[in-house]
């Protein structure tokens, strides 16, 4: 079978304050600011990308920080917890680090024979750190967190669903995922390449409240595809299966299609190329505001409207 979807690409969420968002993901979690750009549909709002050194697919968490946005609510029909991968030997380091920053956490818990910590960012977004010995990705050396303890990228993402049957059918029959583990009310699916960064966990939560979108909630989850050609192939499969994916949209750093899964969560299929080095060098990633060419004539007004932010490892 030809591989059309090969794991997670990125996850995009909402925030209420740009600087506090940067402080958490760069300052506390030690992620690299990979790209500082704007919401193409709302140019007075940043679009901030965090990830590993190069912004590899499967490492990228992005945010739209709307100033003063009311906090959302976790619940059914939502991606509730974004899990990052860390080395097993780093678990106590992260417990101490979170405590040092005054960030409450719970755990360690056990799930599928893995230990993990659970906490929230400054807007209440659910975050997990999953300790494991199988992830060979190098992570990002930010000069503050020892590289042997650093976050390597995504591990999995948890989708809370009132009913799972149709979502499971989408994942397995159309999106090339296979069931690899099951525990109580959680089912783990793996994309074709397998391993950390290629999992998605579906949690059956029939008694959940309905999720409300706001600061701290995930806007969409994106799955990776290798090329424009493979994206069109998976788009055709979605159409045949009765879904309504958008036309291909140019996001500068990847091309995207969007559609709703049966439980209401927004899915995206994003291409791996062209990547984040198309408009700045690897060394300079995230250091300056990047705009799509159609917004360049308005750069002065856009920069004036955006609040200044400083990305500093701590």
Image (spheres, helix red, strand yellow):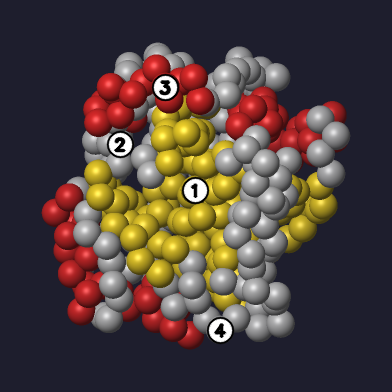
Residue toward you, 27 or 2: 27
Say which element carries label 4. Answer: loop
**Which residue is label 2 attached to?**
253
- At x 65%, y 74%, the residue is 210
Distance in Å between CA atoms under marks 3 and 2:
23 Å
Quarter of the image that includes the N terminus: bottom left
Distance in Å between CA atoms under marks 3 and 4:
46 Å
Distance in Å between CA atoms under marks 2 and 4:
34 Å
In x, y percent, where is residue 42? 43, 41
Q: Which mark is residue 12?
A: 1
Q: Considering only order in the chain, which callout, 4 or 2, is on the residue closer to the N terminus?
A: 4
Q: Residues within 10 Å of mark 3 (few under 14, many from 20)?
A: few
**Which residue is label 3 attached to?**
301
Q: Are marks 3 and 1 in contact (CB under 8 Å)?
A: no
In x, y percent, where is residue 10? 44, 47
**Which residue is label 4 attached to?**
163
Q: Residues within 10 Å of mark 2 (few under 14, many from 20)?
A: some
């Amino acid at each position: 079978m030809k591989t059309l979807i090969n794991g997670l690409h990125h996850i995009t969420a909402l925030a209420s304050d740009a600087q506090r968002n940067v402080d958490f993901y760069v300052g506390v979690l030690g992620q690299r600011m990979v790209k500082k750009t704007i919401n193409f549909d709302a140019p007075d709002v940043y679009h901030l990308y965090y990830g590993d050194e190069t912004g590899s697919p499967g490492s990228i968490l992005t945010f739209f920080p709307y100033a003063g946005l009311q906090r959302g609510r976790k619940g059914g029909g939502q991606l509730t917890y974004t899990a990052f991968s860390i080395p097993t030997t780093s678990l106590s380091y992260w417990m101490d680090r979170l405590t040092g920053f005054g960030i409450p956490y719970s755990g360690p818990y056990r799930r599928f024979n893995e230990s993990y910590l659970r906490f929230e960012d400054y807007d209440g977004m659910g975050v997990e750190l999953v300790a494991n010995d199988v992830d060979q990705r190098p992570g990002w050396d930010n000069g503050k967190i020892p590289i042997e303890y650093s976050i390597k990228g995504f591990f999995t993402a948890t989708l809370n669903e009132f009913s799972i049957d149709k979502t499971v059918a989408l994942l397995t029959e159309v999106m090339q995922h296979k069931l690899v583990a099951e525990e109580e009310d959680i089912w783990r699916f793996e994309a074709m390449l397998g391993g950390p960064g290629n999992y998605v966990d579906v949690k059956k939560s029939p008694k959940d409240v309905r999720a409300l979108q706001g600061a701290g909630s995930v806007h969409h989850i994106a799955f990776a595809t290798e090329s424009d050609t493979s994206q069109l192939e998976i788009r055709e499969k979605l159409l045949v299966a009765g879904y309504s994916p958008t036309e291909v949209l140019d996001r500068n750093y990847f091309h995207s299609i969007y559609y709703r899964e049966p439980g209401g969560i927004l899915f995206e299929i994003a291409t791996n190329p062209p990547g984040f080095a198309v408009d700045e060098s690897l060394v300079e990633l995230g250091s300056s505001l990047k705009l799509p060419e159609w917004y360049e004539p308005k750069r002065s007004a856009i920069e004036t409207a955006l609040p200044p932010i400083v990305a500093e490892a701590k």
